[in-house]
């Protein structure tokens, strides 16, 4: 709880600085994980026209009071989505109009919860796939985006829900077939993967534990792939790496406590697997509610490989509120007891990146279906464990 309060103080400090007239410095540079190599190749040279056959051209208009617009355009994996936008918006507190590239970011923008935090207010943004899991990307005045998966194209304006601009963007969307007629690999459901069997699960503890050895969350997903591949897929899916200790929280609280990732990096309690605390923590949530609710997971590198590949073992849960810690009568997070929903959320968000090649589900012997966490909260599950194979980065030529 102390950690929560410390971060809350940083948030209040940010509001205090603004309310006392702290001047806008140069446009803020927000700290974020680097985009994976596969994602950087998705934005092509804007001076070139894709070599594939154009299969669709459509005009869409977006007014300043619209957050997201369903274009009605379904794209296929590997297709180039070329978007060109013109027009102007005007915000009541802005000194000038802005175009599809958005306004330059200033200090006060850190107070705004924007759909795409790395771009300015009023920028044209897009997403491909399910709205609840697809990560937005910057379109601006022009963008050539390769679709990582099949899905519906949505276009929106990078603005808070309570801060609409006036004006209109006129957007031309052209869709080109994959270059050279090449098929684009996407995650495929498989019944089994080599090495994912009963013998493997005999070496993986069914549950993680706290420092005192009390059993806690269920191990409910595995990832096969290098450290780089694992980090790339989480980052591309919008998960944020969590601070490993309180010192990092204090530093990040000062720097970015009022950015979109304000509380996402708040440390998770340490839980243990293979005799050590988690190697990584990842979180996915909106900052306003993340003190109380967030999707989060812990992940450990297994002390053995599977068919020569690195294995990551994870436990994912969804915080939904607070409850009493039955170990010490303190306050702790309450998790959604249906933990399969969080396992499925991990699958959807990671698969939406196009950086997962195979997906399987494995039911171990004597599956864990009901239990309590180390803090006393109950949960239930079908017992199935999600298995994902992450795409390895393509080396630059």
Image (cartoon, helix red, strand yellow):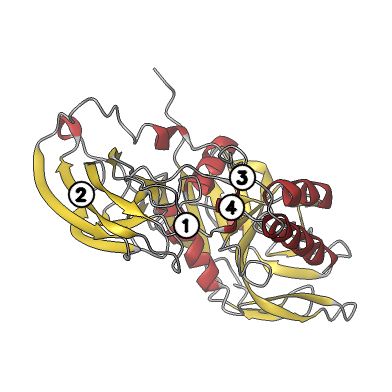
Residue 13 lies left or right of residue 166; in this view the side is: right
- Sequence-wise, which precedes: disc 3 or disc 2? 3
Residue at (29%, 27%) from the top-left corner? 45
* Residue position marked by numbered label 1 in the rendering: 93
SS at mark 2 in the image = strand
* Residue position marked by numbered label 3 in the rendering: 24
Give neighbour class at mark 2: few <14, some 14-19, many 20+ (Cα, 10 Å).
many
* Residue position marked by numbered label 4 in the rendering: 108
What is the x, y in percent for residue 122? 39, 52
- Sequence-wise, which precedes: disc 1 or disc 2? 1
Q: Nearer the viewer, mark 4 or mark 2?
A: 4
SS at mark 3 in the image = loop
Q: Quadrant of residue 325?
A: bottom right
* Res. 194 visible in picture: no
- Sequence-wise, which precedes: disc 3 or disc 1? 3
* Residue position marked by numbered label 2 in the rendering: 171
Furthest residue in direction top, as rendered: 397
- Sequence-wise, which precedes: disc 3 or disc 4? 3
Residue 355 lies left or right of residue 66; in this view the side is: right
Identify whether 233 is placed above or below 257: above
């Amino acid at each position: 709880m102390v950690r929560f309060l410390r971060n809350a103080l940083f948030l209040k400090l940010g509001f205090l600085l603004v309310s006392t007239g702290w001047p806008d410095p140069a446009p803020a540079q927000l700290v974020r994980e680097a985009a994976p190599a596969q994602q950087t190749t998705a934005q092509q040279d804007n001076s070139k026209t894709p070599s594939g056959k154009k299969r669709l051209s459509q005009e869409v208009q977006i007014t300043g009071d619209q957050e997201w617009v369903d274009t009605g355009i379904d794209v296929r994996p590997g297709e180039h989505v070329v978007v060109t936008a013109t027009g102007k918006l005007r915000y009541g507190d802005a000194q000038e109009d802005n175009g599809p590239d958005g306004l330059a970011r200033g200090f006060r923008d850190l107070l705004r919860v924007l759909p795409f935090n790395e771009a300015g207010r009023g920028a044209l943004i897009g997403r491909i796939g399910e709205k609840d899991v697809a990560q937005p990307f910057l379109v601006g005045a022009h963008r050539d985006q390769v679709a990582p998966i099949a899905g519906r194209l949505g276009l929106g304006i990078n603005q808070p829900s309570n801060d609409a601009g006036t004006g209109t963007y006129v957007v031309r969307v052209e869709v080109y077939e994959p270059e050279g007629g090449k098929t684009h690999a996407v995650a495929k459901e498989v019944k089994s993967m080599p090495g994912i069997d009963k013998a493997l699960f005999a070496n993986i503890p069914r549950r993680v534990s706290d420092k005192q050895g009390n059993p806690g969350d269920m191990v409910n997903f595995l990832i096969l792939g290098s450290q780089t591949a694992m980090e790339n897929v989480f980052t591309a899916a919008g998960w944020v790496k969590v601070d490993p200790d309180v010192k990092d929280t204090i530093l990040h609280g000062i720097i970015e406590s009022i950015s979109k990732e304000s509380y996402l990096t708040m440390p998770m309690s340490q839980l243990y697997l293979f005799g050590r605390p988690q190697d990584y923590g990842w979180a996915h949530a909106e900052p306003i509610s993340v003190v109380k609710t967030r999707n989060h997971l812990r992940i450990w590198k297994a002390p053995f490989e599977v068919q020569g590949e690195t294995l990551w073992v994870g436990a994912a849960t969804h915080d939904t509120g607070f409850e009493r810690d039955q170990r010490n009568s303190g306050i702790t997070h309450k998790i959604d007891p249906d933990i399969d929903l969080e396992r499925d959320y991990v699958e959807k968000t990671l698969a939406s990146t196009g950086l997962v090649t195979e997906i399987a589900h494995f039911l171990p012997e004597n599956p864990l279906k009901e239990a309590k966490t180390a803090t006393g909260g109950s949960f239930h599950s079908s017992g199935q464990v999600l298995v994902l194979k992450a795409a390895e980065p393509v080396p630059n030529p």
